[in-house]
Image: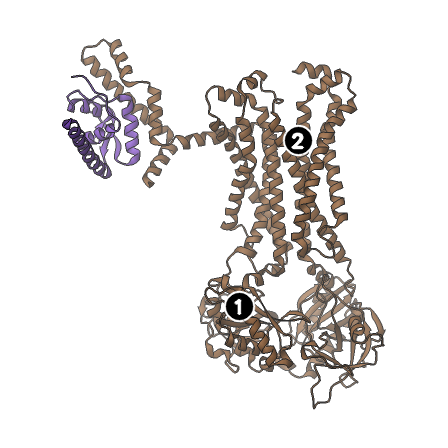
């Protein structure tokens, strides 16, 4: 089989040599035969005649030999390709438009598919990743929350459907000992993490079971990236000591380069190291930043696991009502945990680019049909001299292939640029660390797109061309006016489809525009202008005691306030629209005690006095914190408007008291007196409703990790470096990190929506342009076709305006049908993007109306340009032309 | 004796059989067949060459250029190993076929 293929290939590639050989071989035969006849005494003429007679037609024999060598089909194909390239080069205008249109369509598809592949399809770097699941706890008051470590231990002991589980804790560390102090991210994991995932280090060992228990020696795995960037890929890394938060860790391994987790992981420590000296590990009520990774038993489904886990959670809820009341469990695949909330956006965009490709194909198909009509005579002639209709179709498909192939090449170039832009616009953490690139899988997709579009735009024109009526076509002399009725109907259908596809895309884009506009006009509850934020975390040994921490914060505020250009500086712990949250139960003085799981559960802010003014929170009642609210002063708190409304309805909350946590019998509660009420903020994103919030003074609730807010008239980069100098003057080992203006924080919170919107608008505009070109093409072609008819009408006395109306009404039918079909399809399809919309209905009438009217207007304008040409038709010329 | 046109499918067999003796060029093959069959069989010269190329593609014979007895460049064909096996198989089939046909004819 293989040798057969090689033989054919050789015959094909070395065609000239093979042909020459054949000539020589046959000539040799005829000469020998001639000699033989001459020897037998025939005259020369007679001998030559006999040789010819014996041999038969020389060309025919050659042809049969070529057939026997099995290269004919290939040869014909190569010929067709060559011919296609030649004819395409002869009509550069047509070719350029077709190539460009296809390049746009295929390029957009390739770029978006690379994101789809990277985020949703590329296998996660774990063994059998499809059976890996992520578990969280849930509570009706908040939704999905982290898991408490003792609950995890119970889950693991009781579940049969998820026989293997591992706790994964998200952590931050100060990495010292490098050029600048730095904040890095890490995980604390159960040793079973490695047996669950199958992940193996490239260097060193994984954790052993004994490292699950508190008190184990501090050991560490480094990420490949950190090993490369901070330790020069030292091959003797094992055994080296790395200092995190002034604690000395021994490096026992390096993770592989393709290892990734749902959040950034620069280092991994065993959970036993994390639990050492960490009392919260044993507390069932503590829910830090932990998820549980599990592997389903072979053959088990997510549904079975969910059913079992819900039973276990219900039992735990009954067994520990104080800590687990109303807590349930939620399961998702690891893939979903990685993709996060970006999945709907990606899928909507994938749908959009497929539509763009369809519009592009419809356009190119129309171009081919128009060209085919102009080549009717050529085709008729070919058929007349013996070309089969199959051959004609194959030959036209070869042209389609050439166009699709070079279109795809152009598309790849566009995609490379597009991928670059997308990865820069999309926040990388929202992509879950996925690699988005032109990898082999993506290229395969592009190739498939190319072949699909080739058939999509090539088949109809090819079939139409082969349907030539020989005698009439030859007689008519191949004017471009001889396209049949069926072809015109098909062209009209294509243009109508383009209009409706463009409408769907524009409606989608319109809904996104309106959503984002509404979202950005939501009052976030604070004023982001001119405010810079940066985080600090005092984790080193000298800050073990509260006074030391407080001392650092006080001095920091003093020094930063004194910097030139700074209007105010403040510290806070839960900056709106960022991810840091701490919530706790509260007990209001005198309230009827609820069930354990139903206590008011506000978000807690720890804030310095200037926090309210720096962030521009509106003070509704009472006062903000002042410098007199010291650690020894009476304990005070601020509440937000929602707390005032829910917990103190109808009464002035100022002066009322509450304490943190549920009542603890036998202990005197530490009451906090409410001194003021501030407006609600959009803590969890502009699209999410406000929640209960309370504020505690930073002097009375000391936190080692805070965010510094600085309001100034100075340019952010400049002020950042002066602030860094101020921090350095206090403590050289303190990194500042996650520096951003509050404007950027607001932008980042809508970035996925924004990029989706930008791309949808781009695709919509593209589809609109292509549809306009499509409808323009159909009308101008039809005007050209009807020149004679128009000439006759005018000669018989028709008004020019009547004639123009005739042409325009054809365009209006296309636009009308397209808009109607598109509107119906949009009503069904926009429902798929409901997750991306904000306070806009998927059938928002103003958006639909605006898009429909706008699109119809543009379509009619595209008709008007060629229609005007009818005004210039001179009846004499038109009639003579025929 | 009058000449007989070759029945379908026997051309390949004759070519393989001829080449089993020694490598030969196309004209030589047609001469040899005629000679060996005492002039009864004559190969249609027009169909000889397509058959040779087909056999070459199947890998039963292979070609190389050599010098003929009258000192000219000629394309010689020779049997390959698979060609030899094929010849044996086809020869066997043919003999059984002719024997069977003869038997049927003989019984009438």
Q: Nearer the viewer, residue A433 or A146?
A: A146
- The chain drawn in purple is B
> Mark number for residue A305?
1
Chain of residue at mark 1: A
Residue A179, image x, y percentages: 59, 69
Dot 1 alpha-carbon crowd within 10 angstroms: few under 14, some 14 to 19, many 20 or more: many
Q: Residue furthest bottom?
A: A666
Looking at the image, residue B37 sits to the left or right of residue A150; the answer is: left
Residue A257 showing in the rendered view: no
Residue A55: image quadrant is top left
Give the residue drawn at x 61%, y 30%: A93
Q: Nearer the viewer, residue A591 or A791?
A: A591
Residue A50, image x, y percentages: 26, 13
- SS type, badge 1: helix
Q: Nearer the viewer, residue B69 or A481?
A: A481
Give the residue drawn at x 47%, y 62%: A128
Q: Are marks 2 and 1 in contact (CB under 8 Å)?
A: no
Looking at the image, residue A665 sits to the left or right of residue B50; the answer is: right
- The numbered mark, 2 or 1, whose residue comes first in the sequence reads 1
Please identify the quadrant where the N terminus of chain A is shown.
top left
Please identify the quadrant where the C terminus of chain A is shown.
top right
Chain of residue at mark 2: A
Question: Does A215 appear above or below A80?
Answer: below
Question: Does A619 appear above or below A761?
Answer: below
Which residue is under mark 2?
A777
Residue A710, image x, y percentages: 75, 68
Give the residue drawn at x 35%, y 20%: A59
Question: Does A830 appear above or below B38?
Answer: below
């Amino acid at each position: 089989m293989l040798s057969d293929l090689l033989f054919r290939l050789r015959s094909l590639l070395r065609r000239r040599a093979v042909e020459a050989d054949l000539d020589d071989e046959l000539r040799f035969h005829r000469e020998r035969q001639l000699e033989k006849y001459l020897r037998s005494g025939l005259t020369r003429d007679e001998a030559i005649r006999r040789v010819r007679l014996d041999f038969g037609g020389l060309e025919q024999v050659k042809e049969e030999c070529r057939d026997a060598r099995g290269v004919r089909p290939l040869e014909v194909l190569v010929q067709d390709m060559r011919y296609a390239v030649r004819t395409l080069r002869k009509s550069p205008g047509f070719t350029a438009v077709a190539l460009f249109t296809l390049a746009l369509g295929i390029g957009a598809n390739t770029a978006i598919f690379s994101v789809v592949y990277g985020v949703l399809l590329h296998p996660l770097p774990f063994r059998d990743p499809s059976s890996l699941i992520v578990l969280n706890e849930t509570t009706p008051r908040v939704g999905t929350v982290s898991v408490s470590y003792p609950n995890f231990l119970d889950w693991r002991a009781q579940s049969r459907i998820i026989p293997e589980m591992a706790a994964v804790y998200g952590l931050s560390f100060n990495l010292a000992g490098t050029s600048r102090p730095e904040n890095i991210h890490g995980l604390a994991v159960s040793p079973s993490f490695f047996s669950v995932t199958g992940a193996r280090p490239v260097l060193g060992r994984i954790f052993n079971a004994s490292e699950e228990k508190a008190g184990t020696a501090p050991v560490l795995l480094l990420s490949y990236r950190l090993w490369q960037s901070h330790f020069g890929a030292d091959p003797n890394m094992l055994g080296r000591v790395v200092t995190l938060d002034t604690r000395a860790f021994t490096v026992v391994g390096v993770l592989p380069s393709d290892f990734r987790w749902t959040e950034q992981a620069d280092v991994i420590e065993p959970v036993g190291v994390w639990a050492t000296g960490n009392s919260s590990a044993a507390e069932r009520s503590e829910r830090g930043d932990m998820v549980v990774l599990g592997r389903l038993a072979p053959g088990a489904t997510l549904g079975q696991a969910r059913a079992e886990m819900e039973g276990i959670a219900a039992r735990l809820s009954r067994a520990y009502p104080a800590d687990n009341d109303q807590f349930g469990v939620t399961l998702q695949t690891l893939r979903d945990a990685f993709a996060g909330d970006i999945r709907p956006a990606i899928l909507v965009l994938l749908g959009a680019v497929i539509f763009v490709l369809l519009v592009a194909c419809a356009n190119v198909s129309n171009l081919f049909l128009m060209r085919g009509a102009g080549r009717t005579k050529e085709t008729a002639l070919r058929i007349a001299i013996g070309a089969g209709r199959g051959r004609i179709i194959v030959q036209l498909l070869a042209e389609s292939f050439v166009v699709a192939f070079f279109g795809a090449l152009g598309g790849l170039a566009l995609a490379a640029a597009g991928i670059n832009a997308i990865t820069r616009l999309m926040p990388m953490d929202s992509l879950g660390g996925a690699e988005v690139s032109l990898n082999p899988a993506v290229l395969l997709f592009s190739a498939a797109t190319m072949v699909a579009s080739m058939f999509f735009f090539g088949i109809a024109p090819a079939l139409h061309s082969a349907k030539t009526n020989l005698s009439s076509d030859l007689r008519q002399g191949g004017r471009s006016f001889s396209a049949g009725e069926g072809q015109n109907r098909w062209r009209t259908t294509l243009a109508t489809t383009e209009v409706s596809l463009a409408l769907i895309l524009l409606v989608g884009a319109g809904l996104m525009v309106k959503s984002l506009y509404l979202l950005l006009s939501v009052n976030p509850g604070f004023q982001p202008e001119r405010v810079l934020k940066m985080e600090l975390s005092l984790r080193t040994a000298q800050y073990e005691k509260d006074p030391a921490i407080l001392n650092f914060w006080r001095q920091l505020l003093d020094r930063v306030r004194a910097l030139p250009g700074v209007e105010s500086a403040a510290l806070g712990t839960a900056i709106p629209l960022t991810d840091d949250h701490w919530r706790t139960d509260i007990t209001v003085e005198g309230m009827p005690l609820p069930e354990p799981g139903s206590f008011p559960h506000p978000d807690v802010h720890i804030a310095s006095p200037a926090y309210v003014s720096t962030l521009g929170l509106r003070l509704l009642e009472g006062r903000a914190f002042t410098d007199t609210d010291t650690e020894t002063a009476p304990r005070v708190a601020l509440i937000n408007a929602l707390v005032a409304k829910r917990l103190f309805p109808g009464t002035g909350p100022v002066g009322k008291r509450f304490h943190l946590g549920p009542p603890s019998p036998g202990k005197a509660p530490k009451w906090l007196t409410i001194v003021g009420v501030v407006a609600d903020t959009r803590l969890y994103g502009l699209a999410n409703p406000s929640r209960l919030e309370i504020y505690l003074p930073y002097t009375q609730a000391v936190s080692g990790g805070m965010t510094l807010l600085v309001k100034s008239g100075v340019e952010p980069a400049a002020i950042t470096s002066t602030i860094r100098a101020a921090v350095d003057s206090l403590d050289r080992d303190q990194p500042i990190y996650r520096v951003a203006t509050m404007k950027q924080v607001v932008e980042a919170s809508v970035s996925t929506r924004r990029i989706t919107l930008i791309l949808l608008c781009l695709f919509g505009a593209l589809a609109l342009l292509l549809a306009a070109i499509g409808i323009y093409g159909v009308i101008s072609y039809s005007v050209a076709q009807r020149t004679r008819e128009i000439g006759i009408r005018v000669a018989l006395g028709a008004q020019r305006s009547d004639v123009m109306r005739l042409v325009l009404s054809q365009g209006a039918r296309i636009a009308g049908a397209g808009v109607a079909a598109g509107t119906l399809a949009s009503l069904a399809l926009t429902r798929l993007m409901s997750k991306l919309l904000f306070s806009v209905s998927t059938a928002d009438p103003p958006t639909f109306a605006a898009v429909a009217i706008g699109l119809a207007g543009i379509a009619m304008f595209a008709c008007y340009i060629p229609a005007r040409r009818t005004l210039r038709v001179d009846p004499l010329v038109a009639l003579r032309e025929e | 004796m009058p000449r007989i046109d070759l029945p379908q499918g026997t051309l390949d067999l004759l070519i393989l059989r001829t080449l089993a003796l020694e490598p030969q060029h196309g004209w030589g093959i047609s001469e040899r067949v005629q000679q060996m069959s005492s002039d009864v069989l004559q190969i249609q010269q027009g169909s000889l060459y397509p058959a040779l190329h087909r056999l070459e593609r199947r890998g039963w014979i292979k070609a190389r250029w050599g010098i003929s007895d009258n000192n000219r460049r000629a394309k010689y064909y020779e049997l390959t190993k698979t060609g030899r096996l094929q010849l044996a198989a086809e020869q066997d089939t043919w003999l059984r076929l002719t024997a069977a046909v003869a038997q049927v004819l003989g019984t009438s």
